Image (cartoon, rainbow, N blue to C red):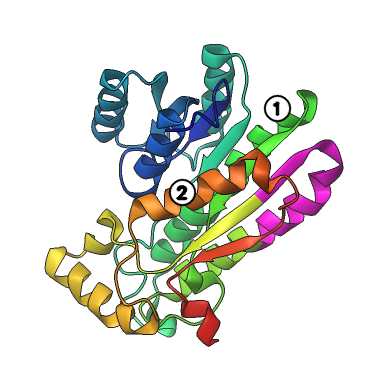
């Protein structure tokens, strides 16, 4: 496999499973030195050990991306471990247990605030500290993970989730314009139906029901692999995408082409 990220220092949040794990895989296997982070230490360490056995240069730090002290420590640890931070993939996000269940007027405040914290505050805090380093060290690339629910109405997504993911898009565009003259590129991907553990928060049967309900919206009527989302993040981070910033890239099997 081409080592197109050889020597690059990469930080990936939510790297213990799903899109985050796939993203850590693609960067590590293409020569990057990767700092994996996850709130679940067990899964994060397991992915790290697997990649080490494959000969990849990786490390892990347990961190809660909704806590500023944890994010600040994570960025500092990445730099201390690898001597730099060139690329970041901010993957943390969560629809919460009842975000897609009750109608908007029945949404609990606790659910709303939890979802905003995990899906939006985490991205704000990550970008804040990543950009602070990159400004002083010649630039870098950041890719955030939003959702089609932040772009258009998705009936299986709740109001809290939709609002948080729309916020990720606005933060991405704001940062892209604000720091373009300092060699920092910021983009985001918007996944279509990509089965992850997030779909199974209410149980595997319910998760499959949601997938089956959403798939007809995609002209390419098959679930999207997490590796396909990770490949998009990798492309946005490579030199071939040097003029791409402030972009929302739907990896959605054609869903948005219908809108």
- Is 61 positioned to the left or the right of 208 in the image? right
Element marked by disc 2 = helix
Q: Which of labels 2 and 1 is toward the front?
A: 2
Q: Would you identify the image quadrant in which residue 23 lies?
A: top left
Looking at the image, tell me whether mark 2 or mark 1 is earlier in sequence order: 1
| Residue at 56% in and 50% down | 144
| Residue at 62% in and 19% down | 84
Residue 93 showing in the rendered view:
no
| Residue at 41% in and 24% down | 61
Instruction: Say whether residue 215 is magenta.
Output: no
Residue 119 vertical placement versus 5 (above, below): below
Give neighbour class at mark 2: few <14, some 14-19, many 20+ (Cα, 10 Å).
some
- Give the quarter of the figure containing the N terminus: top left
Q: Which residue is identified by label 2? A: 231
| Residue at 46% in and 67% down | 161
> What's the magenta region?
170-186
Instruction: Say whether residue 174 is magenta.
Output: yes
Residue 133's label in the rendered image is: 1
How far across and down, in percent of the image, does residue 183 sit? 79, 37
How far across and down, in percent of the image, does residue 213 sit? 27, 82
Front in this rendered view, residue 62 or 51: 51
- Is 57 positioned to the left or the right of 128 in the image? left
Do the residues under discs 2 and 1 have CB atoms within 8 angstroms? no
Give the main secondary structure, helix, strand or loop, of the magenta stretch: helix
Residue 204 vertical placement versus 157 (above, below): above
Residue 96 showing in the rendered view:
yes
Residue 89 vertical placement versus 121 (above, below): above
How far across and down, in percent of the image, does residue 54 sit? 29, 22
């Amino acid at each position: 496999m081409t080592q197109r990220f050889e020597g690059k220092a990469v930080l990936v949040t939510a790297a213990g499973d799903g899109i985050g794990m796939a993203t850590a895989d693609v960067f590590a296997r293409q020569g990057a030195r990767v700092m994996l982070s996850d709130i679940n230490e067990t899964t994060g360490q397991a992915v790290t050990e697997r990649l080490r056995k494959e000969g990849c240069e990786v490390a892990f730090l347990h961190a809660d991306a909704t806590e500023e002290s944890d994010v600040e420590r994570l960025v500092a640890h990445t730099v201390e471990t690898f001597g730099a931070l060139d690329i970041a993939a901010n993957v943390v996000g969560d629809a919460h247990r009842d975000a897609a269940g009750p109608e908007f007027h029945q949404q609990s405040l606790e659910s709303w605030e939890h979802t905003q914290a995990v899906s939006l505050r985490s991205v704000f805090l990550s970008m804040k500290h990543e950009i602070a380093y990159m400004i002083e060290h010649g630039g870098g690339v950041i890719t955030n993970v939003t959702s089609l629910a932040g772009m258009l109405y998705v009936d299986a997504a709740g109001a809290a989730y939709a609002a948080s993911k729309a916020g990720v898009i606005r933060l991405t565009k704001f940062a892209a314009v604000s720091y373009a003259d300092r060699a920092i590129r910021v983009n985001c991907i918007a996944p279509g139906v990509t089965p992850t553990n997030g779909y199974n928060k209410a149980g595997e049967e319910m998760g499959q029901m949601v997938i089956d309900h959403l798939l007809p919206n995609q002209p390419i009527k098959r679930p999207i692999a997490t590796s396909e989302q990770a490949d998009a993040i990798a492309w946005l981070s490579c030199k071939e995408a040097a003029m791409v910033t402030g972009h929302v890239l739907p990896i959605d099997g054609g869903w948005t082409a219908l809108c």
